[in-house]
Amino acid sequence: MPQSSIPRWSAPYRTPVTAVLCSSCAFVLLVLQLQGSLETVVLDYNQSVTNNIKGLSARDSAPINYSRAIWSDILTDKANVCTFLEDLYLNFTAGSICPEDRHVVEELTFNPECDMPMARRCFVAIPRNYLGAKDRSNLSWDQALLRSMKQNVRYEAFPMINSFAEVQQASDLGVLPGKYEPDGGKDWGARVWRVGQLARIYEEKLRALERYIPFARNYGVANHQRSIRLVLDVGGGGGGFASALRRLYGLTCVTLTRDNSIPDIKHYFDLPFYEMLVEDGLPTIMWSGSRRLPVPDHSYDWINSEYAVENFSDDLEDFEKIFFEWDRILRPDGYISLTASSLDARCSGLTQFLRDFASKAGWQERVWSGSLPQKPEHPIYILQKSNWKAL
C-alpha cells in the first residue's frame, strides 16, 4: 500500500529485521498482527470512501469498517491511538463528501489524551429520503418524530443497527434475535424513548423530585422570575429526561450524551442518541464530562445525571475535576441530582468522596442516599449550592 495511506503511528512498528531479532518471537508476532489489522482498517476505509464518492449523489458517504476486534487493538495502544484517529479524521478530499466517521469524532472528543477535532472543509452526507420541515407540516408531533427517526438517521454508520425498529428492539430486549445475542444481553441498561410515552415514564419521578427542586412552580412564569431556568442532563442517553421536562414543565434541558460505541465493551449496541435529541428539537452537546464545557460560568440552575456518572472513571482524581467543573457551571443556589445503582460500582470510595467534596464546595445535602418510587433500591443524591459566598 502507498506510504502516505499508512497511519503515521504505525511507522515505529516497521522496524528492520535486524533490530527486531533481539526481541522475543511472541512480541514480534503480536506487533505484526496489530499492524496488519490497522492497515486493513485504513485500506477498507480508503476504498469505501472512494467507491461511495464516485457515481453517487452529492450527499452520499461511506462508513468506516468498525470491527470490534480491530478497534479493541487500536484503543489498547494508548500511546498512538490519538495519532491514528487523527489520521482517519483528516483523510478526506477538500470540497467533497466527509466520510461517515462519527465514531472517530466521538473517540477524539471523549479521549482526554487527544486534541478536539477541528472543522473540516467537506460536506456532510444527507439521507436520500430526509424528512424536512415541509414534509412535517401536516403530521402530528408523534408521527413527525417517528418518521424522522426512520428517515433522517444514516443507519449505515452503525455496525449493528439497520433501522429504528432495531434500535427499539435492542433497547427493549438487550439482544437482536438471530442477529446479535451477546451473553448477558438482557442486563444491558441503555433505554430509548417510545414516542408518546416520555411524559408518563418520567411523571412519577419528576413529581417526587418536586419536593426538593423547585422546578414545577416555573410553568407559566416569566423566564426571569424562574428559580430553574436551564437544566443540564449529564449522560442523558436519547433525551428522555429533557423531553419530559419540556413537555411537562416547559423547561429547557441541554443533554450531554454519547453513542454506545462499538469499542466500548460495556455496551453491546450503538444507538443514535444524538439524532433522538435533535429530531425531538432538543439541544445536545457531544462533550466529555472530563473536559471543560464550552459554556460560561454559572450557566445552569440544575445538573442531573441518571446511571451515568458512576461509569465515567475508576480514578477519584477524574471525579474531582468533574465536580469542580460542575461547581463552575452551576449557578448559586442551583441543584445537583444523581441517581445510580451504586456510585461505588466502578470507582471505590466515590460516595464518600462526593460527600467530602460537597462539604468543601458548599453543596448542601437535601437528600442523601434517598430513593424514588420507581426504583427504591437505587439511591438518589440531591445537593444544593447554597453555602456560597460572593468574592
Image (spheres, rainbow, N blue to C red):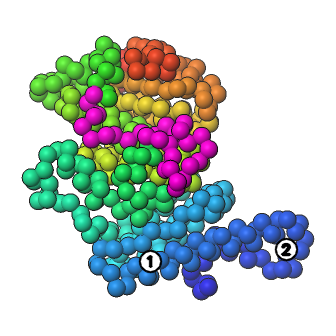
**SS assignment at label 1:** helix
Foreground residue among 391 and 224: 224
Question: Of the residues shown, which amino acid type is indicated by label 2?
Answer: Val
* Disc sitting over residue 338 in the figure: none
Q: Is residue 346 visible?
A: yes
Q: Which residues are magenta?
A: 172-200
Q: Nearer the viewer, residue 290 or 32?
A: 32
Q: Looking at the image, is 48 positioned above or below residue 306? A: below
Q: Nearer the viewer's eye, disc 1 or disc 2?
A: 1
- In the rendered image, residue 44, in percent from the top left (x then y), is placed at 54, 75
Image height check: is 214 above or below 171?
A: above
Q: Position of residue 175 (x, y in %)?
A: 51, 46
Instruction: For label 2, count other residues whose C-alpha is less than 10 Å away and answer few (under 14), some (14-19) or many (20+).
Output: some
The residue at 62%/85% (across/down) is: 1
What amino acid is found at the position of numbered circle 1 in the picture?
Answer: Val
- Whether 297 is among the magenta residues is no
Report how far apart the C-alphas of labels 1 and 2 lie in the structure.
35 Å
Q: Quadrant of the C terminus?
A: top left
Give the residue drawn at x 58%, y 20%: 352
Question: Counting residues from the N terminus, which is met first, the one under dot 1 or under dot 2?
Answer: 2
With respect to residue 1, does 20 lie above or below? above
Which quarter of the picture shows residue 347?
top right
Residue reaching furthest to the left:
138
Which of the pair 19/132 is nearer the observer?
132
Which mark, residue 49? 1
Query: Which label number is shown at residue 20?
Result: 2
Q: Position of residue 9 (x, y in %)?
A: 64, 70
